[in-house]
Amino acid sequence: MESIITLLNVVMAIINFSRTNGNFCSLQGEQVYPQLSKDGDIIVGGIFPFHRTWKITDMSYMIKPSPLNCVSIDFRTIQFSQSLIFAIEEINNSSSLLPGVSLGYKMHDTCSSTAMGVRMAMALVNGNENSILDELCTKPAQVQAIIGETYSSVSMAIAQSIGPFSIPLISHDATCECLSDKRKYPSFLRTVPSDFYQSRAMAEMVKQFGWTWVGAIRRDDDYGNNGMAAFTEAAEQLGVCLEYSLPFFRTYSQEKVLRIIQQIKSSTSRVIVAFVTSWDFEILLNVFHEHNITGYQWVGTEGWITDSTVARLDKHKILQGAIGVALAQTKVTGLKEFILDIMPLQSAGGAIFTEFWEALFNCKYTVQNDSEDTTVCTGQEKLSETENAFTDLSLMPIFCNVYKGVYAVAHTLHDLLGCTKTCPTKKQPDPLTFLEHLKRVRFKTKDGEEVYFDKNGDPVAKYEIINWQTIEDHHEFVTVGLYDSSFPAQNRLTVKMASIVWAQNTNQVPVSVCSESCPPGTRKAVQKGKPICCFDCIPCAEGEISNMTDAIKCEQCYQDYWSNQHRNECVKKEIEFLSYEETMGILLTAVSIIGTFMTIIIAIIFFRHKNTPIVKANNSELSFLLLFSLALCFLCSLTFIGRPSEWSCVLRHTAFGITFVLCISCVLGKTIVVLMAFRATLPGSNVMKWFGPLQQRLSVLAFTLIQVLICVLWLTTSPPFPFKNLKHYKEKIILECQLGSAVGFWAVLGYIGLLALLCFVLAFLARKLPDNFNEAKFITFSMLIFCAVWITFIPAYVSSPGKFTVAVEIFAILASSFALLFCIFLPKCYIIILKPEKNTKKQIMGKVPVN
């Protein structure tokens, strides 16, 4: 019905504004009159919802619809109109602003109807009188600008209707973000911030309180739908999800309202964002009480969060602890007193004043016969004796917005009319010129507040964070924070958390999440088919961490780092190498030193008994060289212990290879000496001259030089080097010596093995020579142990992990060294120390008869 009336009125406006030759002006439809008016040189229009709703008398569509019967006067709108009158009177009494030009006003009632709003706008633009029929439609608009409307939906319809004619519409309370679109609403401006910022302020506030799972109720009109859409978009960017978003309008059927109740009851969120107006709570609060919808944390918009009417209606404390954004408090000196002085209304509009007076004091000027209980109005009632919505000035920021809108018009006129000490002309400026200057106007109110419009026709958004607190059984609106859109994004919202009282009168922040936060060490995994706020917490894999709550993914630790047990921190990987401080390193070091000392002690014993037959028997020079090489073998094992470095990696393998070849060469020399000595005892044999002391020294030198040559080739082509092994263990680093050239390493080992095998074969052949003290037997045993150790070393070396690889190599060195030391020298020491009587040439040669 309203849309049909709107269309008809738009068509009527186009007809009335037609300037085509031959089109004459005449009033279409019935005359409408302003509720409040005053004459002036230039008229400022006002469109306000003086009544909350209307009655429709006939919906049969059989007859022409009668005008809307507006009912239920709204005290808030009277306050708005008072603010406009105050601004007009103040400007007219000013000697510096528009001197000599009087401003008048015409204020019409929209009755909260979109269609009525468009009709009243057209009445303000076209005029309301019957024109002479032969007069062309060339008259200027009746008003310079229009202040209003309160609601976004009505403002949108009016702005679209008068936009083509460049008549400014300056709203004091229409906050829909959609009205910032200058392509659709080129002449719309406002002194109230856009819901674009309010929605973001609310979303940031919800996020700061840790609520990621919220419900929402929105007014089912442009204000609620567009505001909630903006809030949803901002909330999603901040990681907040809406479990539901329910539309509501006061004309909804009971069935629709019950569906809203059921949705709230079945939800798991404990926070409800309400993008509604104070009128909506007149119905909702009663329904919530009937169905026990209590204990929820409410988040409100400026449309109701500071409305004392809503606070009075909330008798059952359903909204207790509500928190929301409200327009920042502003001050206009004298405005409060003027609003409460209601007598000027009588001269501005008699009919509306009478209705207002009767509603204000709950009386009637004319009493029907059947209404004997009705109080008769005397006209002498005092406002101080009553308390209602009119005496509540909690919406002072909106009253100030009306005041600023009128002053914006006045300052623009002042500039366009070229006013200084007086205005040279009182002619109304062209609408388009006036509109362009109005968009750029910038001034300060008498209380120092700067007023201007941005490119979208919006002011700077400043809000207060309001908390409903119960003090002596009454709701109090306590400011607990601020939001200023002119600040950097990270500093726009400030909230004093300690000052907030939450739902159910507690100091504990309510919890409203779909899933509990994922602690550090885990990541979020969204549950299939659910919003992103519903998730499971998956522990990070090994080597990955998350060091923040609700991490989306786990971060891989850098190469030298690994995740700790809780997967919330990357720690330096444990570095593993065989050190002198650990038990294994200490034991191997001790065994190495013991072996060295034993070798030295045996060398001392041999040196002190160097002239005895048992020492001389097998070339004492080779014996001392062998003891020296064994001492080096024991000591070279120490190079394998400790943190690998470039010099230690080179030294350990070359020292090991050369000392062991020197050792085996000496043993091989001793073995050959034994064999040659036996051959020399045969008749006619002259073999010893080919293997005398010089040849023995040269053979040892030659065998050793071959190993030296292999080592030099190895070091010059691809030497060993320190290496971080990251593959064997994920959680720790093995410091080891990389072989460089594996061929070089195995060539060194292979050459040692070849000499050991040759020595073993020769010693085995000489094991049964007819001597009482046959050294070849001991050499055989030593070589047997030596070969066994190194044969078992190879698989153990390849399969041992980390530092155990080095330990196996050290063990093989020490075991083979001890085998040579014990098998070759201990029997001789036994004779030298414990059986000196056997240390004779006859005993050694086997010429003493056995008893």
Image: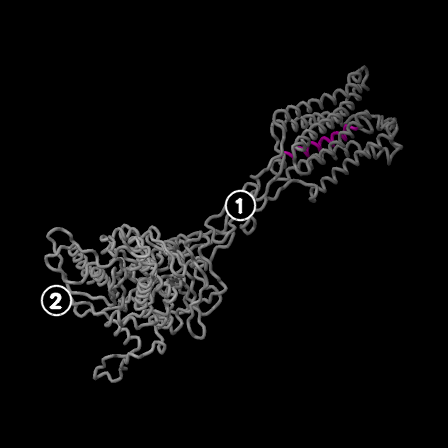
Residue 650, percent from left and from top: 66, 30
Q: Viewed as shown, does residue 732 lie left or right of 538?
A: right
Q: Secondary structure at mark 2?
A: loop
Please provide the residue range marked out in magenta.
775-794
Kindly identify which residue carries mark 2.
63
Q: Foreground: 710 or 411? A: 411
The prevailing secondary structure element of the residues shown in magenta is: helix
Q: Can residue 531 be seen in this snapshot? A: yes
Q: Foreground: 348 or 834? A: 348
Amino acid type of the residue tagged 2 in the rendering: Ile
Q: Is residue 705 magenta?
A: no
Q: Foreground: 798 or 474? A: 474
Kindly identify which residue carries mark 1.
543
Q: Secondary structure at mark 1?
A: loop
Q: Quadrant of the N terminus?
A: bottom left
Q: Foreground: 662 or 187? A: 187
Q: Is residue 793 magenta?
A: yes
Name the residue at 78% across, 23% down: 673
Residue 29, percent from left and from top: 14, 63
